[in-house]
């Protein structure tokens, strides 16, 4: 196992009074791409938010990038080092693509010189850069949000259904970006229902059911294995 | 902190410049309120102003113009601060703000500054509307400017603080007026009395109220700087 980036032991996270995570154990090392798989409402998004320092740790223990999740200050410090692409794109409808990317890059203390290349790479440069976000399609919004993430250069990528709303080229691009980030030393935790798509991306599959991590297995899974439990180590981090 | 405040303020003002909610919705609303006050209070009615030999009969609208001005500003403030946090409450923007390395005090100052700038523009137009519609005199311009600046700072600070408190709630649109209006009642009272003194004199009656407005503004700006991080964290 490489240096641990995420270490959770019996992690509990509440949404109101509901335990969205009810004792999750997980260990993810540097350079891994862990795929979170599970039914709707299983706790995948909450797990991502917990690792982003957004959801509170109500019980158990957890560290991400060495930051103790039970400590509010530590959680705030953690947030600057991770990038979360959730269901929302966190874009201002009335600002243009470029204004959005520029604002968030500056807010994230990112490198402003990376804005233009990132927008071009994600296909939202050129004439789209001056278009208000309210005029973009869902896929273009997603690409703009990815451009913000690229400019942020996080150490830990937390992606919630990153392929949603994207065309085939956009999906390939997301995979390529994750591969490149991991190759340069980052780690990724990806929640996705698109099993065929993420098969080539993940180095490990983590099954989340009912707020628990029920099983994990390492190495890139074959396409047909993702939905099954054949070679899983129940409840064990590998 | 100041760098983050500038960043957030310029973003909010840029959003406003593009969406033009202030010019196309808030400003017309404020002017409409002024006109409706005129319908509600008969312009022909007069009141006796002054005491002793200095008494004179003045139109009631002229006399109550300061209060009507500040009421119109307060109602418009609810729209401005609602808008300020509505843009953060959609599409995961509030989470993204939390994820960014921005100083919470800087975010508060930035959002407050943008609201302040919008309110000052609104007050300029509404103020001119007041002079045009109600026709009050202007005895002490310096006191008037001081009153407007300190009252507006207090309104923007308290409004931003309470709007942040309700930002993450589904009922925020109806909760914010309930939270903000009682808090701003002292500002309405002090600003009305200071403005009355600025318009009709003597100015000595107005400066203590202007000072109170300044203290309110400092208090709420300080409270916002200290509490904004916790409020956004818990919302």
Image (spheres, coloured by chain):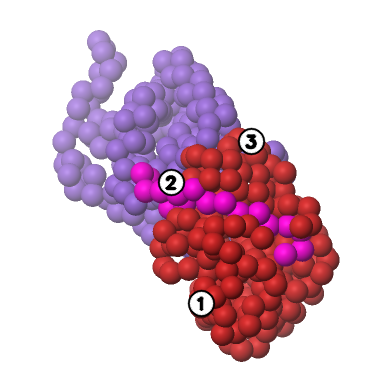
Return the chain for callout 2.
Answer: A
Q: Are marks 1 and 3 in contact (CB under 8 Å)?
A: no
**Residue placed under numbered mark 3 in the picture:** A73
- Of the two numbered discs 1 and 3 in the rendering, the one whose residue sits closer to the viewer: 1
Q: Where residue A162 appears, x then y in whole percent?
A: 58, 73
Asked where in the image residue A74 lies, by quadrant, the reply is top right
Which image quadrant: the N terminus of chain B?
top right
Magenta span dominant secondary structure: strand
**What residue lies at 79% left-to-right and 57% top-to-bottom?**
A2
Q: Is residue A5 left or right of residue A207?
A: right
The red-coloured chain is labelled: A
Q: Secondary structure at mark 2?
A: strand
**Residue placed under numbered mark 1 in the picture:** A228
C-alpha distance separating marks 1 and 2 = 29 Å
Circle 3 residues within 10 Å: few <14, some 14–19, many ≥20: few
Q: Earlier in the sequence, mark 1 or mark 2?
A: 2
Q: Are marks 2 and 3 in contact (CB under 8 Å)?
A: no
**What residue lies at 43% left-to-right and 69% top-to-bottom?**
A39
- Tell me the magenta residue range: A14-32
Return the chain for callout 3.
Answer: A
**What residue lies at 67% left-to-right and 68% top-to-bottom?**
A218
């Amino acid at each position: 196992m490489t240096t641990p980036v995420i270490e959770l032991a019996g992690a509990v996270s509440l949404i109101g009074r509901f335990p969205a995570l009810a004792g999750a154990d997980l260990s993810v090392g540097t350079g891994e791409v862990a795929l979170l798989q599970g039914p709707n409402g299983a706790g995948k998004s909450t797990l991502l938010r917990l690792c982003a320092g957004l959801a509170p740790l109500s019980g158990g223990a957890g560290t991400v990038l060495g930051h103790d999740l039970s400590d509010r200050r530590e959680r705030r410090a953690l947030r600057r080092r991770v990038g979360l692409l959730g269901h929302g794109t966190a874009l201002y409808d009335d600002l243009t693509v470029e204004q959005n990317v520029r604002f968030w890059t500056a807010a994230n203390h990112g490198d402003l010189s990376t804005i233009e290349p990132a927008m071009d790479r994600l296909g939202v440069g050129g004439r789209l850069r001056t278009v208000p976000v309210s005029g973009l399609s869902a896929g273009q919004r997603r690409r703009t949000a990815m451009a913000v993430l690229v400019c942020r250069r996080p150490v830990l990528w937390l992606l919630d259904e990153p392929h949603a709303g994207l065309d085939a080229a956009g999906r390939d691009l997301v995979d390529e970006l994750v591969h490149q980030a991991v190759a340069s030393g980052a780690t990724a935790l990806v929640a996705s229902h698109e099993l065929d798509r993420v098969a080539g991306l993940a180095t490990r599959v983590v099954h989340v059911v009912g707020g628990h991590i029920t099983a994990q297995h390492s190495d890139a899974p074959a396409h047909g294995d993702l939905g099954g439990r054949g070679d899983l180590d129940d409840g064990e981090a590998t | 902190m100041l760098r983050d405040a500038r960043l957030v303020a310029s973003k909010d003002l840029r959003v406003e410049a593009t969406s033009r909610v202030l010019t196309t919705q808030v400003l017309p609303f404020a002017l409409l309120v002024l006109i409706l006050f005129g319908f509600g209070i008969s312009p022909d009615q007069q009141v006796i102003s002054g005491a002793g030999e200095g008494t004179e009969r003045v139109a009631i609208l002229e006399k109550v113009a300061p209060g009507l001005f500040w009421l119109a500003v307060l109602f418009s403030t609810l729209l401005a601060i609602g808008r300020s946090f509505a843009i953060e409450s959609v599409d995961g923007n509030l989470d993204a703000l939390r994820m960014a390395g921005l100083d919470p005090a800087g975010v508060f100052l930035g959002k407050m500054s943008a609201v302040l700038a919008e309110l000052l523009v609104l007050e300029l137009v509404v103020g001119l509307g007041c002079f045009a519609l109600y026709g009050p005199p202007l005895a002490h311009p310096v006191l008037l400017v001081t009153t407007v600046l300190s009252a507006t700072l207090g309104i923007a600070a308290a409004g931003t603080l309470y709007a942040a408190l309700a930002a993450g709630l589904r009922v925020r649109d109806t909760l914010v007026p309930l939270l903000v209006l009682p808090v701003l009642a002292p500002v309405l009272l002090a600003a009305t009395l200071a403005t009355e003194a600025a318009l009709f004199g003597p100015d000595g009656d107005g400066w203590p109220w202007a000072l109170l407005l300044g203290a309110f503004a400092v208090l709420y700006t300080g409270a916002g700087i200290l509490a904004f991080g916790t409020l956004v964290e818990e919302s």
